[in-house]
Image (spheres, rainbow, N blue to C red):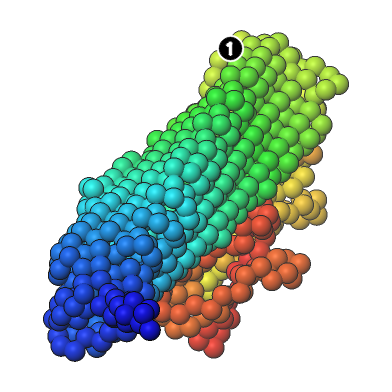
Amino acid sequence: MKNLPAVVFFILTLSLTGSAQTYTVTSNNQSWSSLVPSGTCTNCTINVPAGWTLLLNSSGTCNGCTFNGGTMNITSNFNFNNAATTFNNDTVLINSAATFWKVNFNNDSVAVNAALSSQNGTSTVSHARMKINANVTFNAASFANDSIHIVNTTFKTNNTPADFTSCFVEVSGNSGTVYTPGSTITGSNFIFSNKSSMTLDNTLIADGSSFTMHDQSTIKSNGATNIKNSSSIVMDGTSNSFTAGNDLPISNSTVTMNSGSTLKASSITATSSTINAAGGTITSDNALTLTSTTLTSSGAISIKASSVTLQTGSAMTLGSSSSLKSDNAITIISSTLKATDATIKGSSFTAQTNSNINIGGASTLTSDNAITFKASTAKFFGNAWAKANDAVILDNGSNVTIGDGPLAGTAHLITNNTLQVLNGSQLAIANGNNYLYTSASNYTDGTNNYQIRTNTISCGAGHANSCTTGYVYGCATLNNAGAVGCVTLALSAPELTARLSNGQVLLSWQMTAPDNTHRFIVQRSTDSHDWSPISEIISNPFSSAYNIKDPQPHAGNNYYRLVLVDKDGHIAYSSICILKQEPIAGEITLYPNPIKGHTFFLRTPATDAILVKVYTLGGQLLLLSSLKGQTQYTMQLPPSFVINSYVLVQVIGNGRTQTFTVLTQ
């Protein structure tokens, strides 16, 4: 019996300190001191009826408590010590600085108007809505299905993990900052505006997530960065930057850049991805590698790298005033490079394995060493030019064309060393405005040497150019049959005529006398610069009249011309005829055709549902898409699809089917 007072005292102590008790708020705006008279509660459960508020407005202490429902308003120095504090289905108002041993928010609405700090363990924030107007610091945290708005303040985790899953995070204001040592972001959307930022000391992994940056916002990862699985980076406005301190792999994802934007990394590798740039700078301190990827510049973009490689069906398009600079090699493998009024410079330049190079406008291509084409096609048109300080090499059946038929551009090619035209390759110089300059006396086909430094090809009497040492003027071809002038255009090329009939273009020409023509190639263009073949006909010695149809002219201007190729490989061009096709009411329009890369567009007369199927000529289904609600759609072929071939696009809607035969380049 002597121990009884001690037992009674212990029981009384538990009651007074509120240990492991359940409390229910009995009135709106009830204070902590009236709910828990002792002021201290350990491992307690606090229930607040919906619509009522509990005022944490005294120097109370709650160790490891759970708060359920209602509103918690922290208005004074309240202590959350020694264990995790959990809020469930609450509205939490942090109006006075709050320091938690550890805090969890589950299905809560949280307004942070004064500093919040969670000092231990990994906090869990799930299905929460957070408006953050004051600094927030977690030791570590995991966020899932949250909506977080950070306004002109710092949101920080000191340790990992700092992971986000299915979250929406908006950061705004000059001082709006997200800081973590590293983060995995899955299925989430981040929006940055008004000079806000995100900084990671180590790794950033974006898996199926998007980052939208406005108005001089920045994202910087000082470690490895991985953008994958339909993630996107959008830098609109001006002067946004995304920087990776180490490698930056981008796979099955998109990057969109605007004027003044910056994408920078130790190395950049894009696979099955799309990069669209209206301007800005892409910098890779080491290699820039594109694999099955499209990079399109609609404005002035500057691309800088130690080396540049396009491979496996990639396509790079450089718009006006853009530049591509590589300290070492530029290598194009089974891919496409297009440039208009752009600058391209590398230590060496190689296009190989069915690559397609189109350099136009006032573009320049310069190589400190050789320019090499292997089993590839290249066109230099407009006023574009290329210069190699070493050899120019055409190999494995490559075809390089300087100039654009009868057009007046001054495209030309310069080599300060040898010219090699090997293994069935051919160099064609279109007309007298175009030329090859070489410092070598001869060019070689690998077996024979042909004199070209001093020549009379398409120059001298009867030609626009006088014969000048080192220059080969067009029209001329250089192949394994030697260097010869083309057949004079005015004497050999017939007049091509075109007329519309039931939505088709009928093309015809007449040969007036027997000649040496082997075949006719009919070409079409939408801009009179970039030409694509639509038909090829072998010359018929028993007929002088030829007719073909273009069943699918583009809406708008269509330019047509003939390319005549004789039995010796000489070429001649007809004059160009122009025909305008007005859109037919109720018809669907596909453009461009040919497709440049993997992207094309559909324009429909109404917003009704349509079904789009894309097949290879062999019948393989490449794309199946149901669309509704717009009159214009952007379509994307699978990144793995290898371009430079034809596809069939079938559009079904409104009780009719339209089929388009489309060339991909």
Q: Position of residue 581 (x, y in %)?
A: 46, 65
Residue at the disc numbered 1 = 468
Camera-side residue of 489 and 405: 405
Q: Specify whether 540 is left or right of 378.
A: right
Camera-side residue of 328 and 358: 328
Q: Is residue 550 visible?
A: no
As drawn, the residue found furthest toward the front would be 2
The residue shown at (56%, 75%) is 625
Position above or below: 173 against 569: below
Q: Position of residue 87 (x, y in %)?
A: 33, 74
Q: Specify whether 72 is left or right of 600.
A: left
Camera-side residue of 142 and 13: 13
The residue shown at (68%, 19%) is 391
Q: Specify whether 256 is left or right of 5.
A: right
Q: Position of residue 143 (x, y in %)?
A: 42, 65
As drawn, the residue found furthest toward the right would be 447
Indicate the amino acid at tag 1. Answer: Thr
Camera-side residue of 285 and 426: 285
The residue shown at (31%, 80%) is 5
Q: Secondary structure at mark 1?
A: loop
Q: Is residue 252 visible?
A: yes
Position above or below: 278 against 84: above
Position above or below: 310 against 329: below
> Which of the 4 quarters of the picture holds residue 316?
top right
- State the quadrant of the N terminus: bottom left
How many numbered marks have been drawn onto this rendered protein structure?
1
The residue shown at (25%, 71%) is 40
Position above or below: 467 against 16: above
Q: Residues within 10 Å of mark 1 (few under 14, many from 20)?
A: some
